[in-house]
Image (tube, helix red, strand yellow):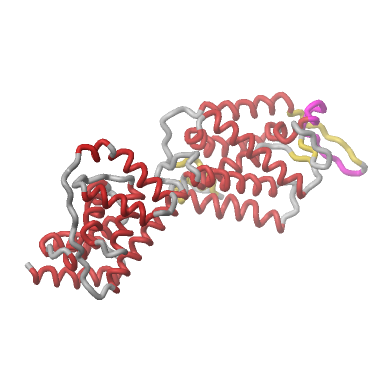
Amino acid sequence: MFIPIKTDVRITKPPLMNYFLIAVCIAVFLATYSPVEVKYGYKTFVEPLKPWADTFVLHSDQPKVWQFITYAFLHSNIVHIAGNMFFLFLFGNKINYRLGHIGYLCFFISGAIFAAVGYSYLHETAMLGASGAVAAVTGAYLILYPRSNITLMGWLFFYTFPIPAFWFILVKMVLIDNVIPANYVNSKVAYDAHLSGYAFGVVVTGFMLITRLLKSEGIDFHYMIKRWKRGRALRDSLQYEMKAAKSIRPEGQSSKYSSESYKLLNDSEQQICRLAAEGKIKDAADSYVSLLNNEHKSVLPENEQLDIANNLMGRGKAEQAEKAYKIFKANYPNYEYIEHIELMLGLLYSRYLNEPENAVKQLERACKKLSDPEQKKMCSNELKKAKKKL
């Protein structure tokens, strides 16, 4: 048996709204919890709440509007509230930090409502507990911090070990704890509310990242997908190089430096980024080339800079692509696939720009880091050719 005890995500501001929600849930539990045994025929049941609190429980067969919120602050026993508050503390602190206090409160309430709607659509029994809202918060954590680690503790020998948050949440909390039991276990646990909450957290958080309502910090799931796409675009450019049958070296154009264009530079960069965001990468690349022709080393955000460099390479604009890749490498030296950038520069210098000395420098660096056998072989062969030109 393993339980999560902490994550490796660090926050710099106190998650006061999450503390407040936890405090409210505990206060409501203390005010409403009063278990009483009640007999129905030959069976005995335990009614966990005081009679007056029943009006705040979600009765799916005849629900009241307020019950879609109030049910989330009620709990049936100590284990119920302890489990929910533990996971709310574990994951909610980080989501509170990312969304802000008001944003987090709205997210928590909305998650509770969505979970209640999902449960009521499928069931006619009563429901209480913050599980649906906590699941929404956990789903948000899955999207915002998929590459973080969760430390688990084994009960038997009290040892700890880290596990990727993405797999723990997806496999353990969603699949094993909810999807499978929902189909094969007869229980009073509101699995469908949990699954509705997870769905809400994942979809809404993903939507906020895609639409930029929530700023990406370079560690979320949306950013991972974008990095994968950029890596694929870079590999496509490498494939283009491998299939290229002729040398392309267009004559570069240069124009006199204009102070007027310098004044417009910020606006120009913003326009380039807008074109790239709209999917007009060719137009964005052409606009960027205009800046390069003004002899100004304009630096765009990482995504746009790399996309434009790849586009220029794919269109055979060797000199412009070299400038774009060189600027990228100088300003983003910690890029995950920096060896691919070095390989591209090496190929450009060796094949098209007739700069064997620069080609050797870039190719030697790339050969040490590349892991793909085909790319490594191509790099090694090109390095030998470049050295012969020295």
> What's the residue at 46%, 45% (across, down)?
145
Q: Quadrant of residue 310?
A: bottom left
The residues colored magenta run 42-55
Question: Does the magenta segment cover residue 44?
Answer: yes
126 with respect to 216 (left or right): right
Q: Quadrant of residue 76?
A: top right
In this rendered view, identify the residue nearer to me: 214 or 297.
297
Question: Does the magenta segment cover residue 222?
Answer: no
Q: Is residue 233 above or below residue 17?
A: below
Q: Quadrant of residue 230?
A: bottom left
225 with respect to 302 (left or right): right
Seen from this angle, which residue lies furthest left? 390
User: Is residue 79 visible to the viewer in this orientation of the structure?
Assistant: no
Q: Is residue 100 above or below residue 167?
A: above
Expressed as whole percent of the image width and height from the top left, the position of residue 253 reads 19, 55
> What's the residue at 62%, 51% (across, down)?
177
User: Is residue 105 visible to the viewer in this orientation of the structure?
Assistant: yes
In this rendered view, identify the residue nearer to me: 172 or 10.
10
> What's the residue at 40%, 46% (across, down)?
274
Q: Quadrant of the C terminus?
A: bottom left
> What's the residue at 53%, 28% (across, down)?
101
Expressed as whole percent of the image width and height from the top left, the position of residue 257 reads 17, 43
